[in-house]
């Protein structure tokens, strides 16, 4: 056999998985699993798991390495080579398990991830009322928390106007006084302008209007 064929055969042989390599060696010897069990004293289930690379059904790795050595000795295989194949297959299996577990954790994290925090109007009002109570408590004002409701806590335009007026009582009083003065002046001026005017002569003679009225009565 040429060097190229030997190299290709070696590469193909190394690419064969651990389980297939072990099963092929057993078949070449003309044995079934019962024959291999008798030769190795390893249970039928453990041998079947080794050939199928079902590592989940196998015990701890230290025990599995003992099974692999027994199989290599019974089948006339190189122990180190068979152990190396087992270790490579086991690393691939462990890496696959880690990937599956990581993907499962990611899915669970996305499923159970809390929704983004949204502040509702009720919560905002409750927070506003609580802040108001704390501010009043800091100023030494005793407030009954049970009397503060959401309606009381909700700021409205009317309450805002009332608050603005109550915060400046002097301005309100001054505006009322000015309004009363303007009203009084307006009434006074209206009275003066609309008052009936009568004229008389310096000698006490009645005005022309009065004389005309008297002559109408006398004759």
Image (spheres, rainbow, N blue to C red):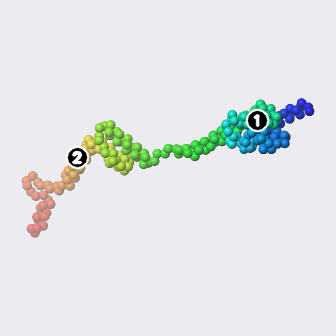
Residue 180 appears left or right of 145: left
Q: Earlier in the sequence, mark 1 or mark 2?
A: 1
Residue that carries the numbered disc 2 in the rendered image: 181
Q: Quadrant of residue 106?
A: top right
User: Toward which corner of the image does residue 172 lie, by quadrant?
Assistant: top left
Q: Distance from label 1 to label 2 (Cα)?
A: 119 Å
Spot occupied by residue 63 in the image (x, y as percentages of width and height): 69, 35
- Residue 197, compared with residue 58, is above or below; it is below
Q: Residue furthest bottom?
A: 219
Quarter of the image with the C terminus in it: bottom left
Q: Could you tell me residue 192's position as x and y percent?
A: 19, 52
Q: How many marks?
A: 2
Structural crowding at the residue carrying mark 1, measured as other residues with C-alpha within 10 Å and reported as few (<14), some (14–19) or many (≥20): some
* Element type where label 2 sits in the image: helix
Residue 6 shows in the view = yes
Instruction: Give x and y (percent) for residue 38.
Output: 77, 41
């Amino acid at each position: 056999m040429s060097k190229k064929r030997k190299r290709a055969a070696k590469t193909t042989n190394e690419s064969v998985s651990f389980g297939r390599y072990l099963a092929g060696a057993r078949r070449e010897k003309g044995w079934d699993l019962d024959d291999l069990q008798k030769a190795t004293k390893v249970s039928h289930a453990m041998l079947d798991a080794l050939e199928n690379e079902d590592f989940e059904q196998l015990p701890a790795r230290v025990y599995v390495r003992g099974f692999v050595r027994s199989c290599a000795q019974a089948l006339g295989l190189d122990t180190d080579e068979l152990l190396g194949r087992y270790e490579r297959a086991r690393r691939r299996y462990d890496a696959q398990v880690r990937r599956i577990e990581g993907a499962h954790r990611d899915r669970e994290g996305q499923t159970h991830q809390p929704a983004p925090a949204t502040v509702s109007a009720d919560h905002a009002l409750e927070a506003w009322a609580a802040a108001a109570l704390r501010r009043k408590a800091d100023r030494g004002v005793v407030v009954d928390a049970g009397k503060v409701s959401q309606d009381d806590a909700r700021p409205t335009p009317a309450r805002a106007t009332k608050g603005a007026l109550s915060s400046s009582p002097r301005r309100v009083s001054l505006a009322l006084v000015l309004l009363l003065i303007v009203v009084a002046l307006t009434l006074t001026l209206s009275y003066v302008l609309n008052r009936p005017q009568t004229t008389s002569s310096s000698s006490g003679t009645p005005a022309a209007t009065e004389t005309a009225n008297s002559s109408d009565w006398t004759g």
